[in-house]
Image (cartoon, coloured by chain):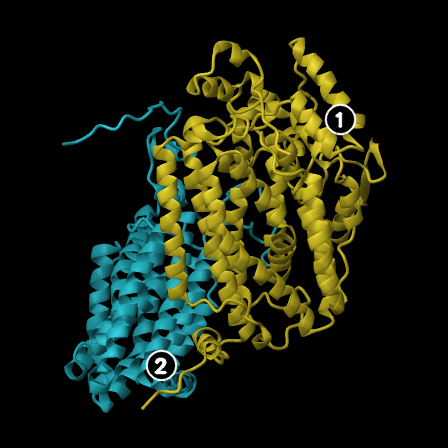
């Protein structure tokens, strides 16, 4: 039996904000994502030129070579606004927490052969520094990018990367029994070990890159596009042969995160490339350039696990990324 | 074997500042190009204290919990038409001012702290600024979602961000924040984290959130409570920033003092809008502006600066002027809006007799003497059907951009005029505080986008009021003018089932003491 609850019904005067109605072409109800994303960033009548960049306005389309008629053409397929993002991450965080607790409670890492643990430690823990660079790079995109559609998602990405750097640090502490020896060794490796130097060099170069969209392509598409599959699929898969799923449980957040975030990255590139041939040519040039750089930087990292097969592993991942660019991001590489 | 556990402090250190490294392939100045040009000397970023030690996973957990609760209430609020439970339709105008004037500043803070969080070369302040950046995004987005329901039933909300970038009185908050963002990262955090968040935020937050509570606006109150724990983190950052700069190098002290002087005055002038909201726009009043200023600035602020005196920091310049002005600020401001309400996106009105009595009691030295006679005169015009709107555009202060209606510190009957010459042009100011800020950086403040100048230069849609209103996206007869004649009031009476005769009379307001 259903009971009809009587409520007072009053006709609203309008269904959404005027800017949203203009973009929707009609005054109709809009999602929370759209109402809290469209047009948040000021576009006109700026008062003072920034002292740190007097050639541009505070918010300026001229900080990238990419040109858009409408910077709100970018949509996040995840429809993340702050509330949606943080509740999604909290759920994933909950799973990660349970995984860590499970591994600790059952002392599962003790069952992993010493040799495998060493490999895992050497392959994963130094990456927390690369994630820190990714954090700053995405904060840069949020700070100097144009239009809330992209910049808010970049700010979420930035915090995600800090979170991942912290998960990697935790994994290090689990592997070294909370002594932080693995973190210290990883930092040493990041600073001095030859295998990590090309990647560190690339990270430092990206932290000094001025064009924010170039940085987006370099960091979020090219570098992540090779690094995540290499580390969280290939190296993780290799470790599974000896460690079972223990290490994978600790990495679950990262692999799930990458799958989700790639959808946003691909959608962003596809929209920018679809806007004009000039954009497409520019994006393809950046993508090629930085895939080359990232492949070169990651080869010695891969070699730590795959030895002489590293070249072919990287070549396969490049091919996958090139295919992804064509199928999902509208780029012919 | 029991593992030796890192202390919480050590662990947090490993999880944040240990992530960074000294670059060797790039010059550090290419990665952090903004850390030196303001003249602040930092010798050791590791001396930065992290007051909260919040890791990202804990942040997600706490914040998601708060978001779930907040959105549950926002949903219930709209389902139950909670907007009809507010004290009076006049109250909603305070929310209009909030969405047009304050929410865009939350967004600006989101971007400004992203800049600071990227530019500081120490991980401690980077992480603190980055978390504040996304907190501020949270604030603007939850405000939009809360107020979305009001927008469906009341005028004036519908194009808030378009208006924020154009309408005359909204250039006051917009220029305030752009001033801070266009400076370097150290001045930005001094301006926003310390001078605004730490010293003055209670005067923004308390009036709006308590005002919401007193006036039955459950959605806004809930947002306020939910934001409070974020705000306490932000205030702590504000104090940490100041102490860090002062402790790093004594050459920083005069620079920080200059910024404190400037941003106290900038912030105080911005709060003019809040003062009139407190004294005039809340049908149920929380406290008077004067009482709030005494409690939150004179007492709390006084104690704070007493504390900072050991670093060689004194009270901000012209704080004494703010004390002299406390008995007139809100009245002078409300009169401006009464004059120019045909070009504003909220309604104004004259206080009713019961409210005049409250104002007399709260302002015994000034209200009956200077302001009551003015309101009574305006009421007599209104009764004759000649509601006064000023058709001459006002002169604006070059610095704070408020119409020049403030009076001399020692004479409430004399308008205060100050001016400076720069490159052969004359610039006008409402106060010594604004003039000093201009004189220190004239090349910056000659750039101000002054709404009145822009109208006269033909940059705002045309020379007539209707053309300018259209350019503002301000719907004449709906968004603007006298409350008594407004659609908002007529709709409210219809929805609340008030009789026709009630509609002809001003809505009675209860006045809290």
**Left or right, A162 with reference to B413:** left
State which quadrant residue B427 falls in.
Answer: top right
Task: Confirm whether residue B446 shows in the render.
Answer: no
Q: Residue furthest toward the right?
A: B410
Q: Colour of chain B?
A: yellow
Task: Assign the N terminus of chain B to one quadrant of the image.
Answer: bottom left
- Return the residue nearer the eye: A146 or B400: B400
Above or below residue B312? Residue A107 is below
Q: Position of residue B123 (x, y in %)?
A: 51, 71
User: Which label is found at residue B277?
Assistant: none
Q: Which chain does tag 2 point to?
A: A
Q: Colour of chain A?
A: cyan
- Name the side, left or right, on which B465 lies relative to B268: left
Disc 2 marks which residue?
A173
Residue A251 lies, in percent from the top left, at 26, 72
Q: Which residue is mark 1?
A: B371
């Amino acid at each position: 039996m259903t009971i009809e609850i009587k409520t007072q019904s009053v006709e609203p005067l309008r269904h959404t904000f005027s800017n949203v109605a203009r973009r929707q072409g009609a005054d109709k109800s809009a999602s929370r994502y759209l109402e809290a994303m469209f047009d948040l960033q000021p576009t006109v009548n700026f008062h003072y030129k920034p002292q740190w960049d007097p050639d541009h306005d505070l918010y300026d389309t001229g900080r990238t070579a990419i040109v858009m008629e409408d910077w709100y053409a970018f949509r996040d397929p995840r429809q993340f606004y702050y509330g949606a993002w943080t509740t999604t991450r909290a759920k994933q965080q909950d799973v990660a927490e349970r995984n860590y607790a499970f591994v600790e409670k059952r002392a599962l890492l003790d069952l992993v052969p010493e040799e495998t643990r060493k490999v895992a430690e050497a392959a994963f823990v130094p990456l927390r520094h690369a994630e820190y660079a990714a954090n700053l790079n995405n904060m840069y995109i949020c700070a100097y990018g144009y239009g809330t559609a992209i910049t808010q998602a970049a700010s979420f990405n930035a915090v995600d990367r800090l979170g991942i750097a912290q998960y990697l640090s935790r994994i290090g502490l689990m592997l070294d029994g909370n002594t932080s020896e693995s973190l210290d060794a990883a930092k040493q490796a990041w600073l001095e070990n030859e295998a990590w130097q090309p990647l560190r060099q690339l990270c430092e170069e990206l932290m000094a890159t001025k064009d924010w969209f170039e940085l987006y392509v370099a960091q979020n598409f090219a570098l992540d596009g090779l690094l995540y599959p290499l580390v969280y699929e290939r190296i993780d898969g290799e470790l599974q042969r000896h460690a079972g799923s223990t290490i994978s449980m600790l990495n679950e957040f990262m692999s799930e995160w990458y799958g989700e975030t790639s959808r946003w990255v691909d959608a962003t590139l596809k929209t920018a490339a679809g806007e004009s041939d000039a954009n497409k040519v520019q994006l393809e040039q950046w993508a090629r350039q930085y895939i080359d750089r990232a492949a070169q930087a990651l080869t010695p990292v891969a070699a730590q696990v795959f030895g002489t097969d590293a070249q072919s592993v990287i070549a396969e991942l490049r091919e996958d990324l090139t295919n992804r660019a064509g199928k999902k991001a509208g780029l012919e590489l | 074997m029991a593992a030796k556990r890192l202390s919480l402090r050590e662990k947090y250190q490993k999880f944040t500042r240990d992530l960074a490294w000294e670059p060797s392939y790039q010059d550090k100045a290419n990665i952090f190009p903004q850390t030196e040009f303001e003249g602040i000397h930092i010798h050791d970023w590791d001396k930065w204290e992290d007051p909260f030690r919040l890791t990202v996973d804990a942040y997600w957990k706490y914040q998601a919990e708060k978001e779930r609760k907040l959105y549950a209430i926002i949903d219930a609020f709209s389902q139950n038409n909670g907007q009809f439970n507010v004290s009076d339709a006049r109250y909603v105008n305070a929310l209009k001012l909030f969405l047009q004037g304050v929410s865009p500043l939350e967004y600006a803070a989101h971007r400004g702290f992203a800049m600071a969080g990227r530019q500081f070369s120490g991980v401690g302040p980077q992480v603190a600024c980055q978390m504040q950046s996304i907190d501020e995004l949270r604030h603007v987005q939850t405000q939009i979602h809360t107020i979305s329901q009001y927008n469906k039933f009341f005028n004036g909300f519908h194009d808030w961000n378009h208006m924020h970038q154009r309408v005359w009185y909204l250039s006051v908050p917009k220029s305030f924040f752009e001033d801070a963002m266009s400076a370097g990262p150290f001045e930005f955090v001094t301006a926003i984290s310390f001078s605004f968040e730490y010293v003055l935020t209670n005067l923004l937050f308390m009036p709006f959130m308590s005002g919401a509570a007193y006036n039955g606006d459950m959605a806004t109150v809930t947002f306020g409570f939910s934001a409070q724990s974020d705000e306490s983190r932000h205030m702590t950052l504000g104090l940490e920033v100041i102490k860090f700069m002062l402790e790093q190098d004594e050459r920083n002290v005069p620079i920080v003092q200059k910024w404190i002087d400037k941003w106290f005055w900038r912030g105080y002038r911005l709060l003019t809008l809040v003062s009139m909201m407190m004294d005039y726009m809340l049908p149920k009043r929380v406290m008077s502006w004067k009482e709030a200023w005494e409690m939150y600035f004179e007492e709390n602020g006084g104690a704070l600066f007493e504390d900072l005196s050991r670093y060689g920091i004194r009270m901000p310049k012209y704080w004494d002027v703010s004390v002299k002005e406390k008995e007139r600020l809100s009245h002078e401001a409300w009169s401006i809006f009464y004059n120019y309400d045909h070009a504003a996106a909220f309604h104004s009105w004259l206080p009713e007799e019961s409210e005049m009595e409250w104002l007399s009691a709260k302002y015994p030295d000034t209200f009956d003497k200077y302001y009551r006679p003015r309101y009574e005169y305006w009421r007599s015009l209104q009764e004759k059907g000649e509601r006064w709107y000023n058709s001459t555009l006002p002169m604006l202060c070059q610095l704070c951009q408020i119409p020049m209606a403030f009076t001399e510190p020692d004479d409430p009957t004399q308008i205060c005029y100050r001016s400076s010459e720069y490159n052969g042009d004359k610039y006008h100011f409402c106060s010594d505080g604004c003039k000093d800020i201009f004189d220190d950086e004239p090349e910056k403040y000659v750039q101000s986008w002054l709404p009145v100048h822009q109208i006269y230069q033909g940059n705002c849609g045309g020379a007539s009021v209707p053309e300018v209103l259209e350019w503002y996206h301000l719907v004449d007869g709906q968004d603007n003018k006298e409350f008594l004649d407004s659609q908002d009031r007529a709709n409210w009476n219809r929805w609340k089932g008030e009789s026709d005769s009630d509609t002809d009379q001003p809505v009675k307001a209860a006045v809290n003491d």
